[in-house]
Image: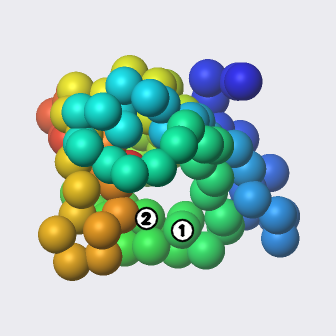
Amino acid sequence: MDTKLDLSALRNSTKSIKIGELTEEVINVLGLNTKPRNIYMWSDRLQHCDKHKCDFSDETEYNESLENIPSIVQNPDYVGVHPNNKGIFYIKKLKSNCLVV
């Protein structure tokens, strides 16, 4: 799997792009009752991410952070389960920001 997310391909696609894998290690750490599986991202998630663009120092930092989503999923600093929607989040400290995937 590529370590960089191709933002233009994702923005111009109606299909999802694989960004990583829910690993046995993460499943065990979080005490989940599931099996390893692929993690995908759809273009509509970029619209959500765009709402946080102002949290970055400039557009370059924002785009680099998004491009690094696959490596964040592969090597996070922290993983957790969202209390409301039960989704899994991956957190990585990047420069001055903390990116939540």
Q: Which residue is mark 2?
A: 49
Quadrant in the picture for the N terminus: top right
- Which quarter of the figure has residue 38? top right
Which residue is drawn at the image coordinates 80% and 51% (left, top)? 9
**Label 2 crowding class (10 Å Cα cut-off): few <14, some 14-19, many 20+?**
few
Q: Secondary structure at mark 2?
A: helix
Amino acid residing under circle 2: Cys
Give the number of the disc on residue 45: 1
Which residue is drawn at the image coordinates 44% and 73% (left, top)? 48
**Label 1 crowding class (10 Å Cα cut-off): few <14, some 14-19, many 20+?**
few
- Locate residue 99, reporting x and y percent: 28, 44
Determine the CA span between mark 1 and mark 2. 6 Å
Quick one: 83 or 31, which is closer to the camera? 31
Q: Secondary structure at mark 1?
A: helix
Q: Is residue 54 visible?
A: yes
Which residue is drawn at the image coordinates 60% and 43% (left, top)? 37
Quick one: 36 or 65, which is closer to the camera? 36
Vertical order, 89 against 43 (above or below): above
